[in-house]
Image (cartoon, rainbow, N blue to C red):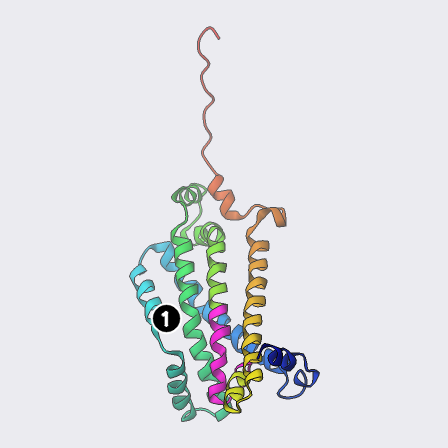
């Protein structure tokens, strides 16, 4: 099976054309990146505000648990059936798939953003207040930079969740690497099915490494030669009076 799957992956005819690996990979990435982007636009502001104010932490935990428990395939079928009654077929199926992926990508981004902001050292907040920063400035210039490692961790988890689950788009006749898994199973072409699964795994690993490198470049002061704003605020302290020398010294 391994040899047959490798032969399928290395056959040049499988890489081109409308059903080729390159096109299916691009489709899979489209679904994944679009869903993670939408999820980030929703979850990042909510998590940041809740982490900054400390209000609604129960909402974050409850919402994350509920969204994680949702059955992705069942949701896809329900959304697709609803969308088909209101939208053109091609738009309805794609919108249903993206909606499911967004719902699955929100929890890790939401919880990591909230946790990173909430865990900001109180001394950093006090230093920012002492420097005259408003609440919004403290959030954007101090808390968010300090929380960036956790935020990127959530984005990595969301990407992995989305790229793995994007294979279900094939169940509603869309593209992506899931087509190889579904079609291979239906045609009893197991090398094709295994090859599709391997491609999804490789895409997940490569994407995760890319996000990890970006996170390292953004959050490591030594790489850019600059100190993050959060570190400047955190390191701020009031001037300490010089020690009084003992008499006779």
* Residue 74: percent from left, percent from top: 37, 83
Circle 1 packing at 10 Å, graded few (<14), some (14-19), many (20+), is: some
Regarding mark 1 in the picture, which secondary structure is present there? helix
Q: Residue at x 50, y 80 (%)?
A: 167
Q: Nearer the viewer, residue 239 or 193?
A: 193
Task: Note whether 224 is above or below 248 in the view shown.
Answer: below
Q: Is residue 179 magenta?
A: no
Task: Based on the picture, tell me whether residue 161 belongs to the magenta stretch.
Answer: yes
Q: Residue at x 59, y 63 (%)?
A: 210
All told, the count of numbered labels is 1
Is residue 232 shown to the viewer in this render?
yes
If the image is split into quadrants, where does the N terminus sit?
Answer: bottom right
Judge from the rendering whether residue 191 lies leftward or rightward of residue 95; answer left or right.
Answer: right
Q: Nearer the viewer, residue 247 or 132?
A: 247
At 58% from the left and 47% from the top, the residue drawn is 221
> Residue 79, image x and y in percent?
39, 85
Q: Main secondary structure of the magenta part?
A: helix
Above or below residue 22? Residue 55 is above
State which quadrant residue 70 falls in: bottom left
Residue stretch rendered in magenta on the structure: 160-178
Q: Nearer the viewer, residue 15 or 226?
A: 15
> Horizontally, is 215 left or right of 13 in the view?
left
Q: Which residue is mark 1?
A: 68
State whether residue 48 appears in this view. Answer: no
Residue 89: where, in percent of width, then height?
48, 93
Among all residues in the image, which is located at the extreme top? Answer: 248
Q: Is residue 112 above or below residue 73?
A: above
* Residue drawn at (44%, 8%) of the image: 247
């Amino acid at each position: 099976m391994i040899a047959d799957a490798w032969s399928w992956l290395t056959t040049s005819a499988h890489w081109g054309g409308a059903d080729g690996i390159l096109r299916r990979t691009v489709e899979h990435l489209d679904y994944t990146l679009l869903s993670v982007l939408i999820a980030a636009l929703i979850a990042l502001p909510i998590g940041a505000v809740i982490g900054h104010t400390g209000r609604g932490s129960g909402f974050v935990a409850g919402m994350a648990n509920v969204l994680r428990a949702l059955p992705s395939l069942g949701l896809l079928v329900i959304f697709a059936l609803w969308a088909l009654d209101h939208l053109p077929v091609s738009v309805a199926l794609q919108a249903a798939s993206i909606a499911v992926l967004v719902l699955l990508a929100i929890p890790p981004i939401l919880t990591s953003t909230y946790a990173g902001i909430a865990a900001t050292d109180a001394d950093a907040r006090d230093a920012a207040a002492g420097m005259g920063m408003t609440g919004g400035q403290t959030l954007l210039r101090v808390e968010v930079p300090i929380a960036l490692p956790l935020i990127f961790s959530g984005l990595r988890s969301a990407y992995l969740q989305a790229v793995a689950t994007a294979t279900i788009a094939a169940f509603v006749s869309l593209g992506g690497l899931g087509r190889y898994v579904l079609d291979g199973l239906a045609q009893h072409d197991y090398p094709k099915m295994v090859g599709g699964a391997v491609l999804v795994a490789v895409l997940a690993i490569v994407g995760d490494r890319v996000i990890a490198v970006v996170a390292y470049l953004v959050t490591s002061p030594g790489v850019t030669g600059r100190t993050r704003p959060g570190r400047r605020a955190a390191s701020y302290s009031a001037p300490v009076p010089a020690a009084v020398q003992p008499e006779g010294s």
